[in-house]
Structure formats: structure tokens, C-alpha cells
Amino acid sequence: MTTQALLELHHVNLVYRALPALRDISWAPQRGEQWACLGPNGAGKTSLARVLSAQATHFSGEFSRSGLLQDKGVAYVCFEQAKALCDRDRKLDDSEFRADATDPGTTVEAVILGGRSPDEHFRQWVARLHIGHIQQRGLRFISTGEMRKTLLVRAILSDPALLILDSPLDGLDLASQEDMRQIIDELLHSGMHVLLLCRQLEDVPTGISHVLVLNEGTIFARGTRQDVVTRSDVLALMNPPVTELGQLPAPAPRPYQLPVSGPLLELRDVSVTYGELAVLRNVNWVLGRDTHCCVSGPNGCGKTTLLSLITGDNHKAYGQDITLFGIRRGSGESVWDIKQKYGQLDTQLHLNYKRGMRVVEVVVSGFFDTIGLYDNWGDQQRDIADQWLAALGLASCSRESFDALSFGLQRMVLLARAMVKSPIILLLDEPTLGLDGHHRKLMLRAIDHIAANSDTRIIFVSHSAGDVPACINQHLRFEPQGDGFEVVCRED
């Protein structure tokens, strides 16, 4: 092993879900260097991180670790880690056996400390990332951004030889993104070795000294930051041409009718509390028939709770002045009556989606609102699915394996799945989360295409102002007010 190398990879190959994920990777970052791994969705960045963090051990080739790396190890912060922790917490949930019917689950503090006692270092980082108010809250009751911060503090306090951060700004509101940029800059200058996984050129901070570019599991380019990010072939790789969109198919038959007039959704003075925690306070919101709404606000403000009220997932809707599609909640409608009117897309659905399916089968599953395909389906449903794939520029993918597509193309396929039954409302919860710049553009363009050429209305949840589609004509914002948030609605 090279004396000054932190680690060395020699001709490493990795197969993941029967598909090649890394191909002949040889790389030896030196001590004192700070690296970013750059590439579009599906490039192999996550696979490289899984090898380095020992999550993937079935690779071929050689992986040599320096004494420093062997002694202090690798900490890896990613969405999959958050999902695994939440899944474990749900399995251990014993609410139905408790007198108060409430299981707080694993707290933020317990996740960070892992059984250790709080010390000054812990308190400093909790204050720095503004998560003191959720310190005793269970993982199932915090937002995506708050989970991201929790995992970052845990990783930093473990004092690793190598800290791997997978798209660390994803899932954070604008203020938290600025805090995170400052923290990353400090880490890059602290002596701790950091590897940033980046999907866009603009995400590579100036404190990075070297960049490794991956594409389809191979090394596309490597070198100093200044040399790599200005190369014409790297710029072309990160900004490929976009495919043409097609005509939207005719609306699928709907097994329901809407009232001839009135808004689609209406909430009057709606409040939600859990114990002493007030999540929503006196929310008023009317979604009209020609309205496309963007819901925004800081991490943990209550956006997810609000969405659960209008999709039928939250029992707190009963007894409140909530009217969905002309029917007052609690008037005898079933959750299915509500859900059939929505098409939904979010990161959790994407991460949970059943594997081993063809793309067209994934889209057809949208007719049944299932994660996977378990019902009988026929030529008519397949034809509509193919038409939606063509409309979104994905016609060539129809018979391919869903697993073989890049993360970005999978997200586009799931958009077709959400639209295949011609929902009244398309509910998009951070649909660009986890996407590179190219696929973000594709997603926003497709949403505007749907809004302009169908009667489906859009509810779009996002932290980033730059990720809002052009069709949006209403903004529902959660704004800080005292010790909580006020929901303010503005029409454009």
C-alpha cells in the first residue's frame, strides 16, 4: 500500500441485484486530500460508498486500508441509513399493547449517543444543527431533514477516519442548507477526511481538492477539482440532451364523480396536536379547481402531517372542518374513496418499491395503488401504461427491468405510475429529492406538461425555491410564529 494513501482500491468490481454496479475501479486517495465523487444518477457513487463503508463485501478485486482507517473506521450518512432505522423502529412499535396507545420509539438522542452519556461535544453539535427541540422525540416523528441532521451528528461524534456524505443538502430547507454548507466547509478544513457524493457540479464545494467522476460504474475522470470540473466531457456528461415529450393519453375512466362546482379541498381552522406537541394550528386552505399549489416550509414544520389529513391517512381529520372533493370528512366515505382520487410520488415510495419488475408493470401497478403488481391486468392497461411512458419520453424503457434504470429514470417511471389512473390530484412530496440536475429538469418539465394538458391538479412539496414547476399558482407556506408555525396561503 502507498505510504500516504488513506485507502487503495485495485480493480474492484461489484454486482448489485444481478447488475454490474462498479467496473474495474482503481483509486488511491492520499492523506490530506479531500475528495468528491461526482456523477449522474446510476453512475455508481452509492455502490462505491457501500464498498468503502463495508456495507458491500461481495466485490472482487482488492481493498487495502491504512492503519488510520482500520483503527477509526468509516461513517456513512445516506437516505438508506435513515430508512433502515425507521423500518426497525416501526417493527418494534408496541403502541397497541400500551395503556396510552403511544410508543415514542427510539429517540433522536438515543440514536446519536448509542448508549453513551451526553457530553459537551454532543451538546455543541445539537445546538449547531438546531435539533435540541427534537432531542427526546422518536425517529418516526421527525422530518426527513431532521433525520439527516441526526445522522450527521452521530457520524461526526464517532470521529471516523473517513466521513462519507451522500448529497448532504438533500431534504433540507434553505436555512438548513446554508448551515450545512458552513459545517461541510469546516469539516473539510478540520483534518477529518471527507468524501462527498455529488449529483451536480455546483454541489462540489471549493474546499474539495480532488474529484472522482463516475459514469455507469466506471471511472470517467479524476484529478484536481479545478481541472475536472472545467473539462468539456465532464460538463457534457452532467448536462446531457433532453428527450422529447409526447402527447398525453386520453384520461382513464374514473369510478367516481365529483360535484359540479366547489373547491377540491377545503380546510377550516384545522389543528393537530400529539400530547403537548402542537403540529398544526388553525390551518385554513382552499384548493380550487384551477389551482396548482406548492407547499413549503422548514424541516419539521408539519407539512407531512398536513398531507396525511387530505389523503385519509391521519385519524386526526375526524371531527374537524375538512371537506375533500365535496364530502365532509367523517360523512361515511372510506379511505379508499379518498385515495383513488390521488396519484402520489415521494422518496419513501421509491425506496420501498418492489424489485424484479419490468417498467411497464411498475406503471400498471398505479391502477391498483400497490407497491408491486398482484392483480390481473390486460392489454388495455398495458397500452395506457405505454402511452404514459411515451408521453414522458420513456417509450424506449417500457420492456426494460425497472432495477436496470438509473435512480433518476426510475423516479420518472414512478411519475407515469402516479398518472396512469388520471387522478384528480397529483401529490408530489419532494419529487426531485435524490435526482441529479438533468433529471430534476426532466421531472419539472414533465410536471408542467401534465398540468398544461390534463385536468389533474398539482400539489407540490419542496424545500428549494428553484425546484418549483412553472405551473404553480398558489403557495401554502409554513412560517415561524412564536414557538410554532403559521400557515399562510397566497394566490399568484
Image: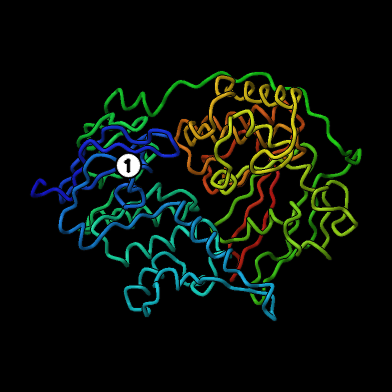
Picture quadrant where residue 250 is located: top right
| Above or below: residue 69 compared with residue 239 | below
- Relative to 83, 207 lies left or right: left
Residue shown at the point (8%, 49%) measured from the top left? 3
Residue shown at the point (21%, 57%) measured from the top left? 69
Residue shown at the point (14%, 48%) measured from the top left? 5
- Under circle 1, the secondary element is loop
Estimate the x, y position of residue 134 in percent, counting from the top left: 51, 70
Observer able to see residue 170: yes
Circle 1 residue: 204
Q: Amino acid at mark 1?
A: Val
Picture quadrant where residue 276 is located: bottom right
Observer able to see residue 40: no
**225 or 486, nearer to the observer:** 225
**72 or 419, nearer to the observer:** 72
Label 1 neighbour load within 10 Å: few <14, some 14-19, many 20+: many
* Quadrant (top left, top right, bottom left, bottom right) of the C terminus: top right
